[in-house]
Amino acid sequence: MDAHALIERATLIDGGVLAKPHLLGGGIAGANEPQWVSSACGARVKDEAGRPFLDFLLGFGSVILGHADPRVTEEVVQDIREGVSPTLRKVKELELADLLTQVVPNAEMTIPLKSGSDATSAAVRISRAYTRRSLVVRWGYQGWHDWCAPRGAGIPDAYRELTITVPFNDVDALGEVFARHGDRIAALVVMPADGHVLDREYLHECRRLTDRYGSLFVLDEVRTGFRLALGGAQEYFGVSADLVALSKAMANGHPVSALAGREEVMRTLADVSLSGVFFRSSDGMAAALATIRVLRDTDALETVWARGRQLLDGLAAAAARTGAPVRPVGLPPMPYHEFDLTGEALMRAEQKFYETVWEQGLLLSRGHHWFTCEAMTSEDVRWAIDVITTGYEAVAAYG
């Protein structure tokens, strides 16, 4: 059964596919779009037809070392053999808490969870309990829960009215929200970077405003944690948060997350409902312990940054050489590009570009920024730049 037949079949029985049928295409899916994977190793994946792809999505940022990295996999397999949900807690939970408090700035206490949405939503619940306020101010993508879901279907208006989404990087707009609602704001939840990066001064203003109005400053580091630096965005931008949501790169693709923060705030956990049997599953904890230790003890993050810088430089050179209306954006560990087009012209350019690179074996997404990992070599990135150049040439020729 080919990929499209699998999709047709899946939309009848698999609600996950029905909710998001094209992980890469964002509405521009075509015959070359990879849709099903059979295996992944290092910086590469193979689709169901056996086609190899150099992967710059890396589990949408959850893979920082490389797919199936043996330093992580061996620890996970051993943990699975010992039972991953053995009713009581394993000591690994304490070991992970201890490690997180060592490497994450301002992390005096942590709680293990399962997904990024768990971590951001736990931060909101704790913030509301700690401040005895209800309003949340946010920027970025924080997951699928009611307080932040991009789609409004199934969410009561009364609940959504408790969340204010602010414009990107707009200090004045943020200040106006706090001036108007400051005594009701429990937390400001901010994602420091995706394809675009918040200014350092904006993040410091977030800290100043929350201090002034008695709110909590929450950094959503689901994407940036353990990727921008071992200490995440707090270390990279030199800013301090009250709570930090962590997931993705902390376990090299394995399902686990954590919320970390100041002890005074985290002790509110004694008063809120926040428990689940799979929060204590130890396979993800084993993966996180192994991954964080590799990041701490090796130059893996330097490699991640170097590959990203190489790619962004290559994108800029390719755009200049081909005359394509495109420019690189983002930080090196989370690189991306944007076409300087709108409307139908943008859709046509993206269709031509992504069809071209998918056909040649490069896994990129139109709807999500990209990532680099330790397993990528400089030769991998040079090859990717060559393929991207071909894509830009196709766009330029298409007009």
Image (spheres, helix red, strand yellow):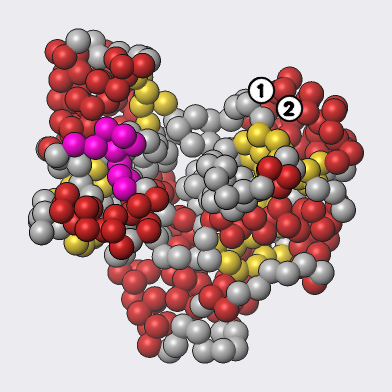
What residue type is disc 2 on? Leu
Q: CA distance from mark 2 to mark 1?
A: 6 Å
**What is the x, y in percent for residue 325?**
30, 13
**What is the x, y in percent for residue 206?**
73, 34
Specify the principal SS of the magenta part.
Answer: loop
Q: Is residue 394 above or below residue 267?
A: above
Residue 10 in sight = yes
Tell me the residue at 49%/36% (across/down): 194
Q: Are there few (<14), some (14-19), or many (20+) residues within 10 Å of tag 2?
A: many
Task: Please tell me whether mark 2 sits on a helix, a strand or a loop.
Answer: helix
Foreground residue, 244 or 382?
244
- Horizontally, residue 285 falls left or right of residue 121, namely left
Tag on residue 170? 1
Tag on residue 174? 2
- Horizontally, residue 377 falls left or right of residue 202, namely left
Task: Please tell me whether mark 1 sits on a helix, a strand or a loop.
Answer: loop
What residue type is disc 1 on? Asp
22 in the magenta segment: yes
Q: Quadrant of the C terminus?
A: top left
Tell me the residue at 41%/65% (across/down): 254
**Quarter of the rendering containing residue 183:** top right
183 in the magenta segment: no
Tell me the residue at 16%/14% (across/down): 398
Task: Please report the bounds of the magenta region as a residue range.
Answer: 21-30
**What is the x, y in percent for residue 354?**
22, 32
